[in-house]
Image (tube, rainbow, N blue to C red):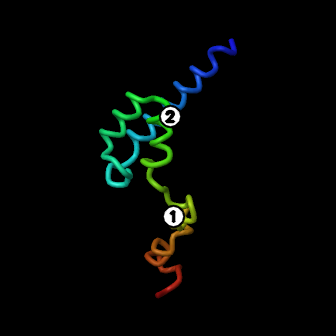
Amino acid sequence: MLRYLPTLVVVGLLVYCLIDCVQAPSEVVRTLPKPVWVLVILLLPVLGSVAWLLAGRPDGQGRRGGPPPPRRPQGPDDDPDFLRRLGRGPSR
């Protein structure tokens, strides 16, 4: 059972990186074009996956000190624009 562990780790890493690459928007992928990254990940499973994680993956907001995404209202009573239209909210 233990002899299959490295193969499972490599396949898991490959699947994770491939899905991550395919779902990433093309305009934020770093270093290489997105189709080239897919080929690199498929042709060189271990090296390509590690390269994707280090050099190709986009920096997300909120990671690495980036600004957090703006907080959106959870319901209509939390939305100042909605309350303003009803005439009960804060005025500008």
Residue 35 shown left or right of residue 3 in the figure: left
Vertical placement of 63 versus 80: above or below?
Answer: above
Q: In the image, residue 68 lies at what x, y percent?
A: 55, 65
Callout 2 secondary element: helix
Vertical placement of 89 versus 53: above or below?
Answer: below
Callout 1 secondary element: loop
Q: Residue at x 56, y 58 (%)?
A: 63
What type is the residue that disc 1 sits on?
Pro
- Specify the quadrant that holds the N terminus: top right
Neighbours of disc 1 within 10 Å: few (<14), some (14-19), many (20+)? few
Q: Residue at x 56, y 68 (%)?
A: 78
Residue 61 shown left or right of residue 2 in the figure: left
Q: Residue at x 34, y 33 (%)?
A: 39
Seen as rendered, the residue at the extreme right is: 2
Q: Which residue is mark 2?
A: 16
Quarter of the view holding residue 42: top left
Q: Which residue is mark 1?
A: 69
Q: Is residue 71 visible?
A: no
What type is the residue that disc 2 sits on?
Tyr
Dots 2 and 1: beta carbons under 8 Å?
A: no
Q: Residue at x 54, y 26 (%)?
A: 10
CA–CA distance in space, label 2 to label 1: 24 Å
* Front residue of this view, candidates 77 and 44: 44
